[in-house]
Image (cartoon, rainbow, N blue to C red):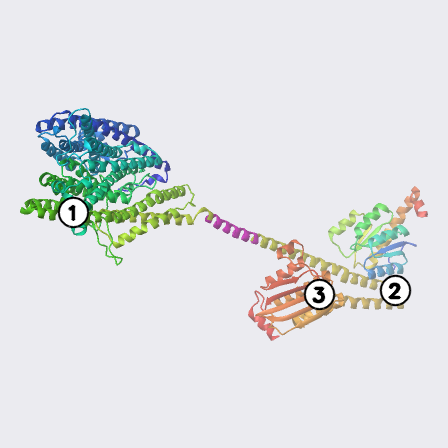
Amino acid sequence: VRTGTPRNALLAPQRLRTATEDERAAVQGRALSGVAVAVGAPLALLAWLAVPGYGPTSLLPRLLGVIATALLVATAKVVVLRRRHETSGSATADPALEGIEGWLPHWPGVAGVSAASWWAARVGGAGLLATFGLRSLSDLAPGWAGASSQAALAAGTVAFLAVTCGLARPEHLLRLALAALSLTGLVVTGSGLAALLGGSLGGPAFVPGPVLPPASGSGPALTSSATAVVLLCLALVSISALAPARVALRRRLTRYLYFGFTVLSAASWAVGVPALLLGSGLFLPGLSAARLTSSGHLGASLSVLLSPLAGSQAHSWASGLLAVACLAGSLGTLAGGTALAEAVLGTARQVAARPSPRTTPRHLADVPPATAGRPSGRAPAPALAALVAATGCWAGAVAMLGPRAWLVVALGSLATGALALTALAPRGSRSFPGAAANSRPRRGRDRGDPSPRRAAIGLLWALTVTVAVGRAGPWALVTAGAAALAGSIALGWRREDKPEGWRLRHLGIPWGTAATALVAMSAVMTLEMLPFFDSSSRSSVWRGLAVVVTAAGIAAMTVFPATSRLWVEQLNEAASALVGKALPALVAALDAAANGELSRSPAAEISALERATRPLERALLAYQGADEMSQLTEALVEASHQAQRLANGVEALARLDNLRLQELVEERTAALTNANRHLIDSHWRRRQLLDLTVRAAEGERTRIAANLHDGPIQRLAALGLILDRSQIRLGRDDKEGVESLVGQARQGLSEEIQSLRRMMSELRPPVLDEGGLVAALRDYLSAWAAATGVEARFDSSPYAELGPNTETVIYRVVQEALANIAKHARASLVTVALGPAGKGIHVVVRDNGLGFDPCPQPDLLRAGHFGLAVMRERVELAAGQLDVLSAPGTGTEVSFWLPALAVGEPAELAGAGALR
Amino acid sequence: VSGAVPPAKLARLVVVDDDEEVAEQLAGLFSDVGYVVTGIAHAARQGIDMVEQTMPDAIVMDVRMEGMSGTEAAQVLRREHPEVPVILLSAYDDEGIVQAAEQAQVAAYLVKGCSAGELLTTVSTVVGQRRGHQGKSLSLGRRATRAQR
């Protein structure tokens, strides 16, 4: 599959901008093309008309002239294309010209031939139709007709067939047919006007055909003017179909022009056709039975059919019906013509708007983007229905009126109808060059290139029509057309195996047309071979049957395009959503992602695409044929899925966008900062505590030293002095003095011993070892109460045996708490309580003092509250937990919990403690 | 020990020690051997005041005291009353403290726990030196005025 997706779009977004350049180039190319046609076609026509007479001798020079003109125009175009190719270096966007451009490097060899054949196809088609026009003119103006008109017709047919099937590529058929139709209109208009002018200037008067008797009273002037109006309308249609400049017009202006043109044409037709009918004698009140039997074949048939219903008025009814049908058919043809022109122009626009034919998958490029101006083939459904109706009505009118002069109009109508049918098919299913190679083989079998099939069908159709017209006359044409329509409908209808009922599906135009052509040909042959074909009564039956078939075909034809068009519209919508919105959004998102910006999300466009694709998925579920519609639908659905998957990827990418990453980083950073602060705090705290511990130890030593200095040493020094003095007094026999001194010494010694004991007890309360924690605390508390004058209560419930270290910690912490209370609290009552809690002990020291505002540990240290900090540290080092509950004015509660067994204490110790 | 060093006649002493008992015993000892203890102080500042009031022949002072230390008081006395010798009596015999005492140009430094004889000999010597020195001073006629006063 050629998926020339711009892989480097992410890196080089400017690559996408070349679309406008391509568009400009394409518009220029189409303008040139239009100019070439406008110049070349009249030249070819001139070459055709310049040769006098009709016959094998005059045909050859005419054809040569046409070919020469074609070559001339083709050469000019190729030169222009080549120059454009050289200057812009960009590919032409017109797929119809791709072939030519592809051959450019080898010009003027094969490229020249190719271009010439292409142009020959156009001009040849024009020549063919010019032949038809001349042929019809021979009916209108017998003076112009020659013996060689039949030969010209045959030659033109051959040229048409050759051009259609041999030289032209399939995609040129549409353009060829359109151009031919348009040129026909131009030729007929020109010829008619020439005849008209000739008549009014005194030349041979304009004489209607043999079966178009001059209207009584109205005169040739009316007929002539009516004809002129009709021809003018045809010319307008033709011009509109050919006008390349419309592409360049602004959309709104185009719409106004389109509207105005349509109104003008409709008005012309509305006036002209009745006038024509009047001129041809089909004036309803003046209709005579003789005229009906002689010329009004269809009217007669209709009146026969209607007689059971309308009785004697049957003929009037039939005439009225025919008149209405003619009017509707005229309008329909007009609408169809303009719709066709619009479709072609829309195609051109889409081609112009296509970003780049070389970088976009073919089946996507063929789908019109939403922004490509008027969508292709967007002729309103009623207009198309009217067009289809017109095909039959016009053909019927022609058949009724009989003269071969109108063959060309009938053929034109049929061609218009067929082309309209083709235009109904989605553009993507039309095979452009290389499309077959690009289309994915389905279900393991390659369906091949439909173009040869299409060409064969076209050939068959053209052959059938030619044979039918040539051998069986207008009736065969009508029958063939009606049968073709019926066959198309029969083959085109698809039954959907859903309980919802019948649904009309895509008309398989190629197969339908082929089958119809076969049926029509058989019908023609049968009619010819039947012995009772000439029998008037039976022929009336046959004709009635033909009318019924035609009517049924018309009725059906008004229905089927709707469903087909619905599908086409769904396809169009999905394709627009994909190509016009989703893919650009995706590309933009990816481009943004490439620039590191991931916030761009194509979600809205993708959901719109999903919505647009859903009906297609349902359609595929319901019916999946091997036709082009199904193929295109499947391709589009898959492309849509791929786009959705891509969008999901982009979304997933966006989910990890910068913001989120930043949040994550911020989160982590905050956590890290927190941890770091914690670490620093804890480090600072440890340092502070170490400092504190060292200082405390030093302070303790200093205190002990000071105590030793102030206590024992002074006492002992004093004792020494007493002893010295006693010795002096003994020498003086001062017995009393000695006794007094000895008494003093004895007292001093006692005091000193007591003092030393107290000191020792403070260093390590012996009661803690001997009497246990409770006794030690009780002793200390009573001593503290006595010293401070604060009432102290002690409360203790039985608790598990504690390790000695734990007891020491409790004792010291309570000591510290009491010291704090004595220093700061100004309390009148202190309670110390011990009790079991979990696998440990809970201690509470509560006072009713001033209280304070407790702060976290590090702040305690910073604030210099070493007492509390040391307490907490002591408890936490012993794997416990300390809480301080306080507020100014409410007293303070220091409570802490310690495990029964302090950290590092072997269990035996606790056991030993328990034994004590 | 007793009477090993006879005290100088009518020598006057001020005793300074923050430990009351030690101060009392010191004063008792000096009194016992014939000195006149003109004042017992328990702080350095108080001792200096007493020196100014009584102009003793020497001051016996503890080193480690609350507030001003003996060494500091010795420096003050050295500046304001250089004629009054300072005998420091301390519980420490650390080299640093001894050096500080020397810098304060004290007359003697004794460690508590020394014998009474040692103490009395030192006091006697210091007082004797002071008396001799004062004599010279008197001859110079300068200190005499103060002494008479």
Q: CA distance from mark 3 to mark 1?
A: 126 Å
The residue indicated by pointer 2 is A729
Q: Tell me, for residue A848, which label it has, or none.
A: 3
Q: Tell me, for residue A899, which label it has, or none.
A: none
Task: Report the front residue among A283 and A849.
Answer: A283
Magenta region, residue range? A660-678
| Precedes in sequence: disc 2 or disc 1 | 1
Percent x, y of residue A701: 69, 58
Foreground label between 2 and 1: 1
- Is residue B46 shown in magenta? no
| Precedes in sequence: disc 3 or disc 1 | 1
Q: Tell me, for residue A303, which label it has, or none.
A: 1
Label 3: how many Cα within 10 Å (few below 14, some 14–19, many 20+) = some
Q: Residue furthest bottom?
A: A915
The amino acid type found where label 3 is placed reads Asn
Percent x, y of residue A618: 29, 53
Q: Quadrant of residue A705?
A: bottom right
